Image (cartoon, rainbow, N blue to C red):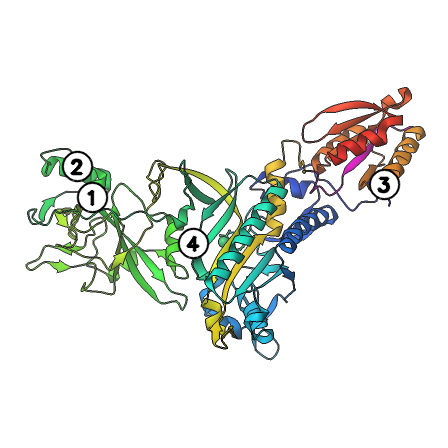
Amino acid sequence: MSYTLMSQLFVRTLREDPADAEMPSHKWLIRAGYIRRVAPGIYTWLPLGLRVLAKVESIIRDEMAAIGAQEVHFPALLPREPYEQTHRWTEYGPSLFRLKDRKGADLLLGPTHEEMFTILVKDLCSSYKDLPLILFQIQTKYRDEARPRAGVIRGREFIMKDSYSFNVDDQGLAQAYDQHRKAYQAVMERLGLEYVIVQAMSGAMGGSRSEEFLAVTPFGEDTFVRSAGGYAANVEAVRVAPAPECNCANAPAPRLVATPGASTIASLVDAVNRVAPRPDREWQASDTLKNVVFMRSDPTGQRHPLVIGLPGDRDVDPKRLEAAISPDTIEPFTASDFLNYPQLVAGYIGPVRLDDPPTKILGPGSVDDLTYLTDPRVSKGSSWISGANLADHHLVGLVTGRDFVSDGSIDVAEVRSGDPAPDGSGPLELARGVEMGHIFQLGRKYADALGLKVLDANGKLVTVTMGSYGIGVTRAVAMVAETTCDERGLAWPKNIAPYDLVIVVAGKGADLMEAAMMLANDLAVEGVDLVVDDRLVSPGVKFADAELIGFPTSVVVGRGLKDGLIELRDRASGDARSVPLTEAVAAILQQVQS
Ligand code: ATP
Ligand code: MG
């Protein structure tokens, strides 16, 4: 056992914040010499960073072993063919790094490895006796993220632990899923992260049951909701309960009202309250049906307008929309797009135009290739004020199902704090988090596409059912940093810190250095992993670096030595106490191991 001299350690701490730091952890990991940026979303890991990374990996390996998962390691450079068979070569869109070899064959850099694991198990397993099986790897993934962010929190190259379960029946899958859920809870506990488990969208993966583990932080990119009664979901996955059917079918036919200049919801409400007042109460924004047009592109590049109808008091949530239509993407509907669809009058778009007979502008049987999807609140029989497809005019009393129909439902309106939880468990509260892990019941999608079948106990060929489970390893390092750092730098928990402690030689005398080295030796023998800050710099610089780097414990050998004392400092609590040199090893061991 030995110790490391700070003068030899390959670390250069920086006094200046990096210009692009978006989150405190990003700033500190760069300044404390853990990572270095190479290009957007691409980072080098330096010795301190690698040590932390290894500790996080070892926690994850440990918990994977506990559920009987076996480790393998796939290449990151993969052939196109399997991804073609599952359509992900196209569906992954611009996020997939595609490349060609010298012979012109298509390759990709793996964004996730469902296909490869499925093929491996297909090649090597033929009977139900080979299952259940859980395989995992800790491996580098590549995704050309649209917005790399906050250092390694969202990288274009990052490390993921991905595991895959293989079972013959649904019950087996449910069990493997549950095992992973518990393993992930254990990992989050050991990382010391405050987390929530939320219902998730299964997105490009397909499949059914799916949950995310979010670390709670105000800087998170994910918004989630929760109710006091226990409902929790990523905002993308919230499914609003459809409004009950109403009976406005006997209401008078829709009528055209002049609403000059009322191209916004606020001005519309104002106008109808003046020109077409309601006897029982004032019109409100939620009485209006707002129709928002987008241009939707599928992965092959085909573009079609998509019109979304929703109550005027709500906006479309871009992230919910993106998640709902994935792998298709959305672009704004531009002025030149409007020229190609003259029946859509900007600011006055509605499902019908009151010609004689009325013209369907949106929905089945409409003039063009427009898809019209409506919010679940636009229930059958509900009555609305909507655009008349005529400048400066609206229709009042348009009844859903009688005067217009949509092509289907889409649940992408913004979710607001106070909205009822879909399961009736109380009002929703919104908060933010960073996705740390994601568990999916994939079902038979990949096994079907790639022909993974085994013989069951009756000798019948059955398609294997799969689960896929990911944890962001590099992201986890950053999130532990993020949730423990303070205004002086990193403050690692003891089980994740790159070293147990630093001995700060605070002064010039040879006696200080000698005492420090002796103490270092004694501690190293006891298995303590430590650094001695032997540099010829001022004690102030050493203290600042010790706090920046985030050693959990600092041992100061300085002025007190002439009285036979050293000082023990705890980074997280800031507590400091003097200890006689003669009792130092025992006291330090106790602090390090607590
Ligand atoms: P996100 O919604 O944040 O883009 P995702 O849903 O695409 O993530 P998964 O495919 O579920 O991610 O990947 C599993 C885990 O890998 C995530 O829970 C996350 O911790 C991590 N991860 C995903 N993308 C990145 C990235 N670009 N950089 C770092 N870690 C990532
Ligand atoms: Mg995910």
Q: Amino acid at mark 4?
A: Met
Of residues 275 and 547, the one nearer the viewer is 547
* Residue 75, position as x, y percentages in the image: 64, 67
Labels 2 and 1: the sequence-earlier one: 2
Q: State the residue lying farthest toward the top.
A: 563
Determine which residue is flagged by label 1. Answer: 288
Looking at the picture, which amino acid does disc 3 mark? Ala
Q: Are marks 3 and 1 in contact (CB under 8 Å)?
A: no
Residue 509 vs residue 165: left or right?
A: right
- Marks 2 and 4: in contact by CB < 8 Å? no
Q: Farthest residue toward the bottom?
A: 103
Residue placed at 10% from the left, 39% from the top?
276
- Of labels 2 and 3, earlier in sequence is 2
- Distance from disc 2 to disc 3, alpha carbons, whole Å, reads 76 Å
Give the magenta range.
494-509
Which label number is shown at residue 201?
A: 4
Task: Kindly report the distance in space between the C-alpha atoms of the residues bearing marks 2 and 1.
Answer: 8 Å
Q: Is residue 498 left or right of residue 146?
A: right
The local crowd at label 3, few if under 14, some if 14 to 19, many if 20 or more residues have their Cα within 10 Å, is: some
| Amino acid under disc 1 | Thr
Could you give the CA–CA distance between mark 3 and mark 1, rounded to whole angstroms? 73 Å
